[in-house]
Image (cartoon, grey):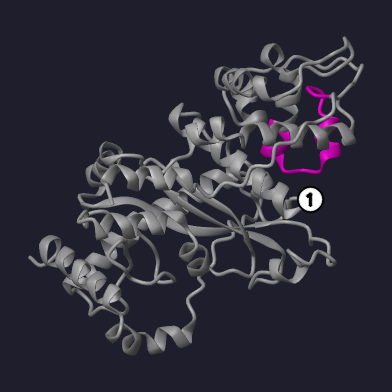
Amino acid sequence: MDDLDLFENLRAVENLEIIEMDAEIVRNSREALNPFQHLSDRQFIGKYRLSKDLCQIVIDMVRPFMKEPSRQSALTIERKVLTALRFLAAGSYQLDVGENSHSLVSQPSVSRIIEEFVNAVNNPSIFEKYVYFPRNFEELNGSCQRFYNKYSFPGIIGVIDCTHVAIVPPKTEDNLYPEHIYVNRKGYHSINTQLICDADLKIINVSAKFPGSANDACVWNSSNVKTFLMDLHENGHASYFLLGDSGYALRPWLMTPYLDPAPLSPEASYNNAFCSIRSTIERCIGVLKMRFRCLLKHRVLHYTPNKASKIINTCVVLHNMCITDNVSLVDVDEDEIIDFGIYQTLDETLLNNRGMVNLRNPELSSGRHIRDQIVQTLFNN
């Protein structure tokens, strides 16, 4: 397979489900305060999570995909975007968003506004501009270089993990997506969302389509990024890999930590460096969910799984825009108990039997060899 084809194949099968949908014109005759004029820069970020300049960029970005007001009493696209951003930021019930003095929109209108906005952001022309896995060797090498500059650890494209986003129970009569498959190991309904981030906390891949009962390894095994990395290695480019925790299987393209290395050994030094680098994805998930609190466990998305997935994708796009634009994160409420939905899913039986399985798995043997080479090069001094 030609090297360029690898990247084209990845882009062609990006795991994004788009359903184009028109929304009705939303009308409201009440006059709201203009937050661009009424709020300070800090207050604006606190309420909408974006700076004023970045918010204007988002408004212009989605304008071609949202309906312009047809009457004087109809809501402008600017007002609709601000209403949707407030919901994503606060994660509170739609009625609370609608009663905000800077939106003043009815609850049914808020629901339609959110749907129209997230459909716009999920359009491939927008989504793929802001969320993409490296598309060529220049971008691959650039991602590796940023990790190396921070951690002196070569070859890392990104760090992978999953996080659960709580949703209301889906309809039990849905034969395709029955309610019970969304119950995760913690007992609540969720979307198990796979994220891969770079050294700057920018998300380079998101898969938000799996029910809460799916474990992290299952989500990864269905990932197009995995297929891409396997093809990359098969074509002789074996110096690129992701980092993942022990819930993932060690492979040449996915490095994991050693299990119970001897204290002060080179393997223990590798694990220490590994943990420091892997914390990147935990910080990324924390920033994402604190910036857009609709994703927090106790806020719960009151939408179907498909709409919830689009909301997650939308938050990822906006998160990346904020990272690129260096938008500050609002202060955390110290009294608020936060659950970021990151759960270890390694099966203890698998852990105990892993040694026997490894002996029969050539991919795992190759992964072990690469990991041992890293230890020999970086930590065996």
Question: Would you place residue 47 above or below residue 229 in this image?
Answer: above
Foreground residue among 60 and 362: 362
Could you tell me if residue 291 is visible in this image?
A: no
* Figure quadrant of residue 365: bottom left
Could you tell me if residue 176 is visible in this image?
A: yes
Instruction: Indicate left or right for 369 with 327 as reference.
Output: left
Of the 4 image quadrants, the one containing the C terminus is bottom left
The residue at the point 86 percent across, 25 percent down is 26
- Name the spot of residue 91 as percent of width and height, x first: 72, 43
- Name the spot of residue 58 as percent of width and height, x first: 60, 23
Question: Would you place residue 119 above or below residue 60 in this image?
Answer: below
Is the residue marked by circle 1 packed among few (<14), some (14-19), or many (20+) residues within 10 Å?
Answer: some
Instruction: Indicate left or right for 122 with 374 as reference.
Output: right
The residue at the point 58 percent across, 38 percent down is 331
**Outermost residue, left side:** 381
**Outermost residue, front side:** 1
The residue at the point 43 percent across, 52 percent down is 281
Give the SS element for disc 1: loop
Is residue 101 inside the magenta stretch? Answer: yes
Question: Would you place residue 246 above or below residue 125 in this image?
Answer: below
Is residue 348 inside the magenta stretch? Answer: no
The residue at the point 83 percent across, 17 percent down is 32
Range of residues picked out in magenta: 85-103
| Residue kind at label 1, given as amino acid type | His
Instruction: Indicate left or right for 327 with 70 as reference.
Output: left
- Name the spot of residue 15 as percent of width and height, x first: 53, 50
Instruction: Indicate left or right for 171 with 162 as reference.
Output: right
Question: Would you place residue 288 above or below residue 36 in this image?
Answer: below
Number of on-image labels = 1
Which residue lies under the disc numbered 1? Answer: 302
Foreground residue among 279 and 64: 64
